């Protein structure tokens, strides 16, 4: 194939808007978005999250208002993250599988009022542990794989019992997808999906999230490098995805998103399976703060989401879901 000027003028297709619309390869729709939301106990609560301007921790009454907004905007699903009081956090994070806990309560109320909205529950212990790690630790602070999986299975079943459509293990323990699948099936939740955080990196872009769920002070100077992936690696991401698919993951995820577009691309090209990406709290914060400061145009929101989709993501978890859906409806 040889393409030469002046026979070929690539600008010809770009000349008119109708033509740009016709030749566009990637499109965005509200159906591509999942909105992650932080929830708290209480009534009529809407606490601003300082490190994530425009995002709030909401109580369940306000969660219902938000759910209605998502449905009206055609956003298919919500991902729930709890911020619970430090006084109920424990070394083993038992609140994670309390059937009367905040998350199961939220799922029940959402499903009662808006059954059509997909509800995704996180699988990990960090919002519930007194040390802020995603799993149960030994005396040296090392996260123990297999007993953590037992807790994650209980958590998954409790969420499914409450009515969750999707369990999304974000903990990065080896083998957890298979065990969660077995636990769900053993309890007759054969249609509860698993969205695996498969290639989840030990990223500093999660900082604002840890403020939002209130795990950063618990975590202190500790990190998650013994279970989350090294940002330097790519082949390992493919192994992680391969294992999760083999263990029964219905959908896989790469996280963070924009600094890891190469990983999204390789995962989609290699496995051709439903692939999601998480535009994480730090990606949101830096863009949002730059927009609020007048340094960037808010059009960068759709551009960033488009880039993630172009790389191979079928859907995106993004705190911009509502802004982006509104922006799309104006186009
Ligand atoms: C914890 C979890 C994290 C995020 C989702 N689930 C943070 C972490 O691993 O420390 C990050 C999301 C974000 O930054 O927006 N299991």
Image: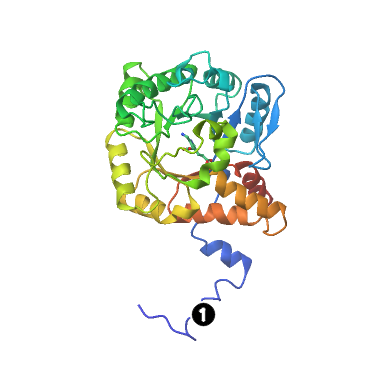
Residue 175 pos. (x, y %): 29, 32
- Residue 282 versus residue 61 in the image, above or below: below
Image quadrant in which you'd find residue 76: top right
In this view, the residue in front, 126 or 10, is 126
Residue 53 visible, this orientation = yes
Give the residue drawn at x 51%, y 56%. 307
Q: Is residue 297 left or right of residue 1?
A: right
Of all residues, the one furthest to the top in this rendering is 100
Q: Name the foreground residue: 129 vs 80.
A: 129
SS at circle 1: loop
Choose between 243 and 14: the one closer to the eye. 243
For the residue carrying disc 1, how many other residues have a C-alpha within 10 Å: few (<14), some (14-19), or many (20+)? few
Residue 219 x/y as whole percent: 50, 33
Q: Which residue is mark 1?
A: 9
Q: Nearer the viewer, residue 251 or 242?
A: 242
Residue drawn at x 68%, y 58% as measured from the top left: 297
């Amino acid at each position: 194939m040889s393409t030469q000027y002046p026979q070929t003028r690539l600008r010809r297709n770009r000349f008119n808007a109708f033509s740009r619309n016709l030749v566009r390869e990637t499109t965005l729709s509200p159906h591509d978005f999942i909105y992650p939301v932080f929830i708290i106990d209480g009534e009529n609560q809407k606490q601003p999250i300082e490190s994530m301007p425009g995002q709030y921790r909401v109580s369940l009454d306000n969660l219902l208002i938000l759910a209605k907004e998502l449905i009206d905007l055609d956003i298919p699903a919500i991902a729930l993250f709890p911020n619970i009081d430090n006084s109920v956090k424990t070394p083993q994070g038992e609140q994670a599988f309390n059937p009367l806990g905040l998350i199961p309560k939220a799922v029940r109320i959402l499903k009662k009022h808006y059954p059509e909205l997909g509800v995704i529950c996180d699988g990990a212990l960090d919002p519930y542990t007194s040390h802020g790690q995603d799993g149960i630790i030994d005396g040296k602070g090392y996260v123990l794989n297999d007993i953590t999986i037992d807790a994650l299975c209980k958590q998954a079943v409790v969420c499914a019992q409450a009515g969750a459509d999707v369990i999304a293990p974000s903990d990065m323990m080896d083998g957890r997808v298979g065990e969660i699948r077995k636990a769900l099936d053993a309890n007759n939740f054969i249609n509860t999906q698993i969205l695996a955080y498969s290639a989840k990196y030990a990223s500093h872009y999660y900082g604002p999230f840890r403020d939002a769920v209130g795990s950063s002070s618990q975590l202190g100077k500790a990190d998650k490098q013994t279970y989350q992936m090294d940002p330097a690696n790519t082949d390992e991401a493919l192994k992680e995805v391969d294992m999760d698919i083999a263990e029964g993951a219905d959908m896989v995820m790469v996280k963070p998103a924009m600094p890891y577009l190469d990983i999204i691309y390789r995962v989609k090209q290699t496995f051709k399976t439903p692939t999601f990406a998480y535009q994480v709290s730090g990606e949101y914060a830096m863009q949002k703060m730059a927009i609020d400061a007048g340094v960037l145009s808010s059009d960068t929101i759709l551009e960033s989401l488009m880039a993630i989709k172009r790389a191979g993501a079928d859907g995106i978890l993004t705190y911009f879901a509502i802004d982006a859906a509104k922006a799309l409806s104006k186009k």
